[in-house]
Image: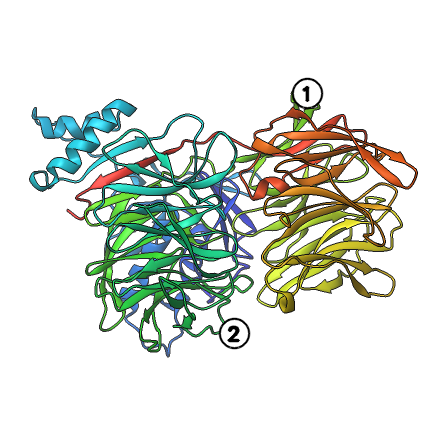
Amino acid sequence: MDKGSSEAIPTKRTFGPFEFESNSRSLRKRGVRLKLQRQPAQILQALLEDPGKTVSRSDLHSLLWPKDTFVDLDQGLNVAIRKLRDALDDSADRPSYVATETGIGYRFIAPVVSDTGGPLSEPPEKSVPPPAAAPKPHPNWKNWARIAIPVCSTGVFLLTFVLLRFRASRPETLQAVISFPAGLHLVTNGENAGLALSPDGRTVAFSAVGVNGQPMLWLRRLDSLNPAPVPGTETGAFPFWSPDGGKLGFFTDRELRRVDLSTGRVSRVCAVESARGAAWASDGDIVFAPSTHTVIYKIGANGGKPIPLTHLDGEKFTTHRWPSLLPDGKHFVYLAASHDKPEPAALFLGSLDGSPERFIAEADTNAIAVPGALLLLSGGKLLMQGFNQSTATLDFGATVVAEGVDYDSGLWLAAVAISGDSLLFRKRPETGSQQTISWFDAGGKRLTDAGTPGTYREVALAPNGRDVAVVCGDPNVNLCIVGPNGAVTNVANTPIVGSPAWSLDSSSIAYSVHDSKGIRIEMKKLAIEEPVRVLSHSAVPLSFNPDGRHLLALRGNERQGRGFGLSVLDLRTSVETEYLPPVPGFVQVSAQFSPDGRWVAYSSQESGADAVYVTSFPRPSLKYRVSPGYANSPRWRGDGRELYFLGGNRTITAVTVSRHGEELLFGAPRALFRPPIFPSPWDRNSWDVSRDGSKFVVNTIRTSDSSLVIATNWRQ
């Protein structure tokens, strides 16, 4: 067989919940693309050429490595087969897909359906070994405990207390489920994720959204049923503990902060921008990734000047993130990944003294360092693999610690926390699709769903009232259009996109692209094949003026601090002018032209908290504050006589608008309904309103299980 051949089999093969596309060598599970490295994908392709037929090890050697490659072929093949089985959630002992013919090779044993719909193979029954008879449990209380858990919340409390109290006398690995009160939505994915165990393993810090819709950090002792919020940590994410357990570090979207848990005092450490993880060293330094496109830094816990610890190879990787300290307190392991290149993510060993980093291995997500080993996630399985720090190498053997572990593939982050002999993780949902684009009337009645459930982050309703633009996909984030018939069409197959904005005639759409080169605005015509037009760099599109000539954009201004302002781009001349200057330290997050183009409604934190304002255009000479309290993401009704926004408690709120001469008059805000919308900060971009104000389209989040699994003595 020819190395790398993609013509040997037709395009698609389906087996179980999986679909393999040979030309791109992409593997999907229930429509969600999985990360499959090159060699495991080549093996899968070879096995699917003729399911049921044994492919010899020597043939696979020839497929994977040229003749002049000097490697341990058998050992390399074993590693590639293991990675393939991990991706398929398969087992060598009781295989469902890849069976080993001892000393000969491998066979694909599951039924395979071709892209034409016909069966490609019907494997003989003897291909799948019969399940082994389960051993009869001994009638003692240890086996009963394995069967009895997980249990209800009260039982979990008692069991968890017993595990913590008597772990020294119970060396067996035991698991229990930790449930959370109704109305508290645990967040382990996205920008507000967070999960961390205290150094003594008795308290978990986590991010959650309460009934007020505000994400913040919470604490729960594992011997208690009642979690408590941590005041001053609103919008907090990615918490991490001080070595003594007395303080908690965390990130907002703009700052690295710490809170003293004994006094409640919150202190600023330094500025960040969409940070990606941190660890608190015993010498008082904090090792952290301050942005999505930076190296790893260290800084004193009381502040100071950040010092870079790693070097970013822009040719291969665009981000360093998720540092985890090794037990020696002098080294850390971190993840290097690329936003827009096919290079697989990789783990590196770094040092607090700034010594050159060393490559460890390829990886799907972050790694957590424990004495003598690293914990890595592969295909939903949490693996413990021996780690030699002096050589920066992993042992070839790995132990499965837990299965079905949740992770955010877009952030390369596993929902796992470890401290001593306590392991905490969140189970991955059976389906990866957790969002639905839904229509509501003005009273909050759910009318219908647009398209099928999927992974969505933002919505924008076209002026025609039929098409909905959504940011879709995981881990490959694209721009999609959901049509009136429910069909979903990809529009922009670029690395990471967002902020869709429709032209007035619904024929074109502008969006932001985020890749290794930074952020830019692109515009694409939907009905005709035409090259994508790049409108601006370092800006995000917000709204087209009805004149069809001007585009409102969000732009940062490095000379005036970390604030963002509004600019206006002339589409004819490509000239961009400042409209509202940035407010240092605060963010103007959304804005929209009025239907007549004479006003701009926008939300800003210029007064210290999110509020909605309206100002005149083209010169902001008149200005009104519309919302008396917290509010964001304003939307105009098609006739300009009503303005909508997300008010307190994430409630869609309406305000009437009338004119008195050249000025505007605003009525009292009235609450319409509170949709099951995405948590902040995604909520502000996750809804829109029809031109007549009668219907609202919302990216709704399904109710998911807000529980965690705790395992003790997990290394046994």
Q: Nearer the viewer, mark 1 or mark 2?
A: 1
Instruction: Give amino acid for label 1.
Output: Gly
Residue 223 x, y percent position in the rendering? 23, 33
Is the residue marked by circle 2 packed among few (<14), some (14-19), or many (20+) residues within 10 Å?
few
**Could you tell whether 344 is left or right of 400 in the image?**
right
Q: Residue 315 carries which label?
A: 2
Residue 181 x, y percent position in the rendering? 38, 27
**Up-down relation of residue 149 to residue 98 (above or below):** above
Instruction: Give amino acid for label 2.
Output: Glu
Q: Tell me if label 1 and label 2 are in contact, CB under 8 Å.
A: no
- State whether residue 467 appears in this view: no
The CA distance from mark 1 to mark 2 is 53 Å
Q: Quadrant of the N terminus?
A: bottom left
Q: Which mark is residue 511?
A: none
Residue at the (59%, 47%) spot, across then down: 608
Mark 2: secondary structure: loop
The tally of labels here is: 2
**Could you tell whether 114 is left or right of 175 in the image?**
right
Mark 1: secondary structure: loop
Q: In which quarter of the image is residue 427?
A: top left
Residue at the (41%, 54%) spot, across then down: 267
Residue 343 x, y percent position in the rendering? 48, 65
- Residue beneath label 1, please? 443
Residue at the (20%, 27%) spot, across then down: 158
